[in-house]
């Protein structure tokens, strides 16, 4: 009797261990970063997000009206700002056209089909925010049917926002750069006069909405307020996307390279509309 | 009653998160809180309750987080804990608030542990602490309000529930 009980206990322990192992394997598959959604998942996600969207539309309407009202109050200041900018626009436009034709000529001369900064825009609205604390993701109203693919870069008027992680037929999920668990390092360049210093974004600090850029050459002098843009290396983000501005420069623990604190140009708390960028196909 | 509470909480979770800034101290976990409120309305049908927890978690996974069974599993574990807590604590708004605190802490710790073990994610320990305190205020208010509202409706409509 005692032996039988002992055997049953051991048996139970083995089953529990096997179950835990299976569970961990399933969970690690479920949390895999490059996992694509299956067809039933896509259908449920599309229909679920649509229903939530329809129900939340009256509240979103109120939110939109409140924002419009706030913008109306600020309209005179914006008008003054725009008037100042307008004076410069003609010269910038001429310069831009000139540069465009130069790039075109150079591309023809070098027989290049695409360059790192070639991109196509696709506008989208944020319909949902991932409510789980750990992920920092948002859902946009464009999906596979609109030509959205995984790993496309997402920007707004202020700069780089994130990248597409999962795509269903009518909606996509965007992983924000405002993510304290940043696993992919992003290659960026800091403008110093007419030259650039190269580095990698390694960390995001939620407290002051800033990134840490490390691996910058020790010999370069970086001033506060310098513009930080993507380099286009790494196949995800096209070059020239604004990331932010340098607020502080230090050296690493071994005094071998410089580390810059870059304040993000994007206000991640006020994201409503974004554009998905696609590198121009050959 | 059960389905209405679940659906409202599920949708409110998404709605409120659209209005609350990232890294705010008011992170909604309304669906999780609704699991505390609905338990008495199952009148000790524990299996049905656990099935409801699992299904809710599964929907949460598919619609909100794109993970297949993480929340289904988490909500199931939370369901077990709520059943245990209901054996110790009677059903009133103070106890509901206490249960909410316990559930939020356990939920965050398990989610943090699972992510560390299975997803190769390196969150600092402080992030766990932050995730717990940032979820407490709003969810305690919600759970108490939901308890008061459902209690009144149940009394008015004479819906049977275990204490």
Image: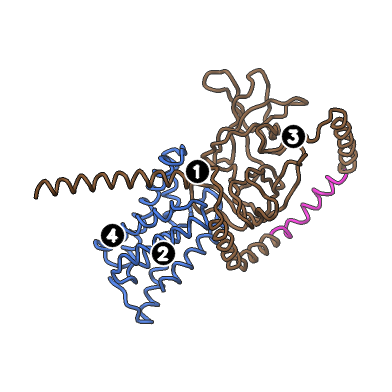
Chain colours: A brown, B blue
Q: Residues within 10 Å of mark 1 (few under 14, many from 20)?
A: some
Q: What element carries label 2?
A: helix
Asked where in the image residue A108 lies, by quadrant, the reply is: top right
Compare marks 2 and 4 and give the one earlier in the sequence.
2
Q: In this view, does A82 lie above or below A245?
A: below
Residue sitting farthest toward the bottom: B157
Q: Residue A22 carries which label?
A: none
Instruction: Provide the residue designation for mark 4.
Output: B85
Q: Residue B34 carries which label?
A: 2
Q: Which residue is drawn at 64% across and 66% down?
A: A62
Q: Does the magenta stretch include residue B134?
A: no
Instruction: Provide the residue designation for mark 1.
Output: A32
Label 1 to label 4, Cα distance in Å?
Answer: 34 Å
Q: Is the magenta stretch mostly helix, strand or loop?
A: helix
Task: Write down the region rendered in magenta.
Answer: A70-87
Q: Which residue is drawn at 58% across and 68% down?
A: A55
In this image, B160 relative to A148: left or right?
A: left
Label 2 to label 1, Cα distance in Å?
Answer: 29 Å
In this image, A90 relative to A223: left or right?
A: right
Asked where in the image residue B127 lies, by quadrant, the reply is: top left
Circles 4 and 3 on the same subunit:
no
In this view, the mark in front (2 or 1): 1
Instruction: Provide the residue designation for mark 3.
Output: A116
Q: Where is residue B11 in the image (x, y as percent from the top left)?
A: 52, 64
Using the image, name the chain to which the residue with label 4 belongs.
B
């Amino acid at each position: 009797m005692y032996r039988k009980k002992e055997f049953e206990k051991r048996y139970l322990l083995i089953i529990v261990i096997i179950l835990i192992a299976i569970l961990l394997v399933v969970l690690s598959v479920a949390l895999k970063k490059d996992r694509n959604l299956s067809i039933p998942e896509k259908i449920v996600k599309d229909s679920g997000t649509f229903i939530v969207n329809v129900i939340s539309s009256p509240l979103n309407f109120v939110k939109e009206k409140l924002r419009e009202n706030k913008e109306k109050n600020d309209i005179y200041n914006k008008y003054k700002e725009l008037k100042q900018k307008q004076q410069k626009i003609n010269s910038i436009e001429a310069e831009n056209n000139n540069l465009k034709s130069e790039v075109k000529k150079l591309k023809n001369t070098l027989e290049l089909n695409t360059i790192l900064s070639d991109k196509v825009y696709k506008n989208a609205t944020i319909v949902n925010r991932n409510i789980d604390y750990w992920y920092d993701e948002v859902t946009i109203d464009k999906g596979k049917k609109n030509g959205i693919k995984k790993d496309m870069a997402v920007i707004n008027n202020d700069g780089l926002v994130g990248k597409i992680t999962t795509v269903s037929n009518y909606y996509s999920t965007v992983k924000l750069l405002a993510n304290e668990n940043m696993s992919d390092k992003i290659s960026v360049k800091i403008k110093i006069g007419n030259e650039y210093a190269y580095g990698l974004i390694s960390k995001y600090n939620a407290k002051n909405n800033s990134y840490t850029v490390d691996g910058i050459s020790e010999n370069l002098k970086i001033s506060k307020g310098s513009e930080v843009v993507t380099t286009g290396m790494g196949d995800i983000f096209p070059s020239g996307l604004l990331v932010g501005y340098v607020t502080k420069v230090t050296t690493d623990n071994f005094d071998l390279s410089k580390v810059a604190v870059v304040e993000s140009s994007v206000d991640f708390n006020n994201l409503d509309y974004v554009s998905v960028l696609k590198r121009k196909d050959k | 009653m059960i389905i209405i509470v679940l659906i409202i909480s599920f949708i409110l979770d998404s709605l409120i998160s659209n209005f609350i800034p990232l890294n705010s101290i008011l992170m909604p976990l309304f669906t999780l809180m609704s699991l505390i409120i609905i338990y008495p309305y199952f009148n000790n049908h524990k299996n049905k309750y656990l099935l409801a927890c699992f299904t809710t978690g599964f929907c949460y996974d598919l619609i909100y987080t794109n993970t297949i069974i993480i929340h289904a599993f988490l909500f199931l574990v939370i369901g077990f804990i709520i059943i245990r807590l209901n054996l110790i604590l009677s059903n009133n708004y103070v106890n509901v608030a206490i249960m909410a605190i316990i559930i939020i802490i356990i939920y965050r710790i398990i989610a943090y542990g699972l992510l560390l073990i299975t997803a190769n994610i390196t969150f600092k320990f402080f992030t766990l602490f932050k995730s717990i305190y940032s979820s407490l205020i709003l969810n305690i208010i919600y759970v108490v309000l939901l308890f008061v509202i459902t209690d009144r409706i149940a009394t008015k409509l004479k819906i049977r529930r275990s204490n």
